[in-house]
Image: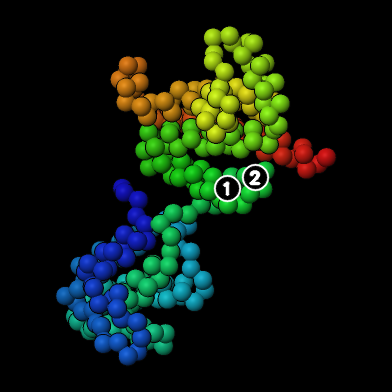
Amino acid sequence: MPRIVPSQVANLIDTLFPVAATQQSRGTKMFQITRSDATQCAAIVKMVDQIPPELITLDEKNYSYFISGLEAIRVALDMWKGVSSWPVAGVPRLSVLNPVTLLRMTLALCPDEAIHVSTAELNFISDQELRENLRKDISATNQALNNGEWKAATVLAGATIEALLFWTLKNFSKQNIKTAIDAWLSEDTEKKRPHAMLEKWALEPLIEVAKVLDQIEDKTAIEARLAKDFRNLIHPGRAERLNQVCDRGTAFSAIAALEHVIRDLSKKYEKKVKK
């Protein structure tokens, strides 16, 4: 089943009932829905019911309009199943606007993307804008996993690991980074020294230097290396050469690495706070 978001339902309403977008006040021309609109109204209700709850982000007043409009349409649909063909124009004692208009008006206030309540808080990141941006990526990663979008989940998890490790290494001095690079390359002489600018690093040096600097545990580094390899599968040439694709296993493995990176960085933050 495809993911339904508020703007999709608002667009459907605009297609089925264009007047809903312009009916705004008591002075607006009356707009009624009747039994002949039952199929259209049923489609709208069904799509609204499929919107993830976390995307309905309305204040008290607008939420009351949203629920009242939705339930008024449900009542009308039940009524039209019987002998009644009574038209519906507004919501008694609440609004003269048509229930379909109320739905469109309130759905237009809702985002198509939101952070799921179960998403890690990332309290170790003090930059609020960056923190919320990363939390959105984590939430989107888990949503992709739930939808069976294996490639999206794999790649998003790898990209978020990269962003988290980049953030933590930005907190170290250039000398500390250089010392850590030297330590890593002394153990693996076949590797090339990464670019002088941290912003140009690939995921591999971020993982290895973060491990040397004790920002992530050895087991986490092992998982992150797998996530690095999976993320490389977005390049079609590499995928063809290795005859590999993103699947359920790569998605779960990459997300496990992401969760452990978050765990390790959170532990570092907690220790710092206690000190």
Gap between marks 2 and 1 measured at Cα: 8 Å
Please tell me which residue lies in front, 249 or 229: 229
Of all residues, the one furthest to the top in this rendering is: 189
Q: How is the image coloured?
A: rainbow
Disc assigned to residue 178: none
- Read off the residue under disc 1: 130
Determine which quarter of the picture holds residue 180.
top right
Question: Residue 24 location in percent, x, y?
Answer: 35, 82
Quarter of the image that includes the C terminus = top right
Secondary structure beneath disc 2?
loop
Q: Name the residue rendered at 63%, 10% in the picture.
A: 187
Q: Image height check: is 48 above or below 135?
A: below
Q: Image height check: is 264 above or below 88?
A: above
Question: Residue 45 location in percent, x, y?
Answer: 31, 65
Please tell me which residue lies in front, 104 or 44: 104
Which comes sooner in the sequence, label 2 or label 1? 2
Of all residues, the one furthest to the bottom in this rendering is: 27
Q: Name the residue rendered at 23%, 73% in the picture.
A: 18
Marks 2 & 1, CB-CB < 8 Å contact: yes
Under mark 2, the amino acid is: Ile
Secondary structure beneath disc 1?
helix
Determine which quarter of the picture holds residue 27.
bottom left
- Read off the residue under disc 2: 125
* Residue 119 appears in the picture as rendered: no
Q: How many marks?
A: 2
Q: Name the residue rendered at 31%, 81% in the picture.
A: 23
Describe residue 133's horizontal placement relative to residue 247 as left or right: right
Of all residues, the one furthest to the right in this rendering is: 275
Determine which quarter of the picture holds residue 188.
top right
* Residue 239 appears in the picture as rendered: yes
Question: Residue 178 location in percent, x, y?
Answer: 67, 23
